Image (spheres, rainbow, N blue to C red):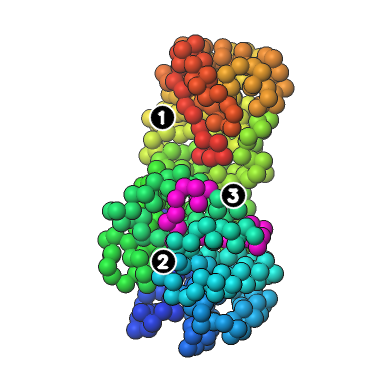
Amino acid sequence: MQKNSFIDTHAHLGDPAFDSDRDAVIQRAIDAGVKSIINIQCWDKEKGFVGAFDIPLRYPFISLALGVHPHEADFAGDSGHIDFIREAARERKIVAIGETGLDYHYNHSAKKAQRDIFIKHVKAAREASLPLIVHSREADDDTLSILKDEGAGGIGGVMHCFSGDAKIAEELLELGFYLSFTGVITFPKAEETREVLKIIPIERLMIETDCPYLAPVPYRGKRCEPAFVVETAKKMAEVKGLSIGDISRITTLNAETLFGLVKEKEDEAKVAYAIRNSLYLNITNRCTNYCTFCAKFDSYTVKGHYLRLKKEPSTSEVLAAIGPEPEKYEEVVFCGFGEPLIRLDLVKEVGLSLKKRGCRIRIDTDGLANLVHGRNVLPELKFVDCMSVSLNAQDSGTYQKLVKTPFKDKAYPAILWFLKEAKKHITKVVASVVAVPGLDVEACRRVAEEELGVKFRVREHDTVG
């Protein structure tokens, strides 16, 4: 089994707290599964940026970001720090600019000096096309104002050590920023931060230690180090209802994407891929319909898995991708980036093979298989334990606005009939809708539960997997 790997997206390895055992700290990080670290080197009023490149030169998997912390804004003045950062950016010695931002909690520097230097950092990041690493404490309004006024949305970045409310999170997401969480989410009294974490799309999250500060439980009160990022990942998995493997895969991909880190080469799309404790089968990218809200028009990546097939897998290739222990999963789901029942014969062959091994089978479908194949296919699918059908509207007119279907007026009635008929052959039948803005979800619920007598599920808009 592949070991989980993590990226600590914010560490201060140059801090004097690590002077006595820095190499041992880095080795412990490697042993814990940390594959990369973004080392934040902040300008020092005594040394400037002296020694900033030493650690990345010794450890190639550690990348560097440079910035002036808002605490030091009064002292930086016209010290040439921005010119130094610009030069490092031109030579691609750094992967981001920061940390920079505003801190009105301590006010170690005047607010105007903080704002002036923050603006210079944003301009430098735009010139270099590098992301920003932003610090904001009790200064969210001014921070957002500067990011918007200076066009930071065009380059993006990350709000590190995020502890703001849902409104601030939403505004940052609209700017294209990622949100990074520390060990604070493990603290017993951090319930508000965990509640905000719940609603942020996992595809926009990262994890960090901010070491040597903010050690997570069970190390709270001790010096923090990169190896402890695993504890933050565990808590994030718990809050998001995902597995630690999901958090590892997704946050790593997010960090690699933002910071332009080298990704592991992936020649082929995943045919079998795990999310939580379910195994999903990606057997076709063909679809009956064109759904206006389909996520694949933005990306073929779902929860860190790349799903754009170069060719459709055969039955033997699907079984090989599933591996020797499919029964260890709670369920096996026919649901990739396409309509699985287009490949009805393969679904039957693979599904029956899995059923003989005691697997629970689910199919996620658009409910139009009978129109596609010209017959009632449901009696052929009695091995299925759960059929989840995309209802997606409360009437035919709404359906056709949201779903461009070749079957036009025939489509919606066919889905309703499919749902009713499915109850005769399959134990659990679910009608689902994607909560696109403006959809009357309660009207859809009434169609599913009262008219059809099936279970009903609402899927979040812009959230896949």
In what element is the residue under mark 3? helix
* Residue drawn at (65%, 60%) of the image: 149
Tag nearer the camera, 3 or 1: 3
Residue 386, image x and y in percent?
45, 24
Label 3 sits on what residue type? Glu
Q: Nearer the viewer, residue 146 or 258?
A: 146
* Quadrant hosting residue 108: bottom left
The circle drawn on residue 360 is 1
How would you rate the neighbour count of disc 2 (Cα within 10 Å): few for under 14, some for 14-19, many for 20 or more?
Answer: few
Q: Which residues are magenta?
A: 150-170
Amino acid bearing label 2:
His
Q: Which residue is mark 3?
A: 174
Give yes or no for residue 154 being in the magenta stretch.
yes
In the rendered structure, which disc, 1 or 2, sits on the residue that comes first in sequence? Answer: 2
Q: What distance separates the C-alpha of mark 2 from that of mark 3?
A: 26 Å
Q: What kind of residue is marked 1? A: Arg
Q: Find disc 2 in the rendering and name its residue.
A: 105
Of callouts 2 and 3, which one flags the residue occurring earlier in the amino acid sequence? 2
Q: Is residue 1 magenta?
A: no
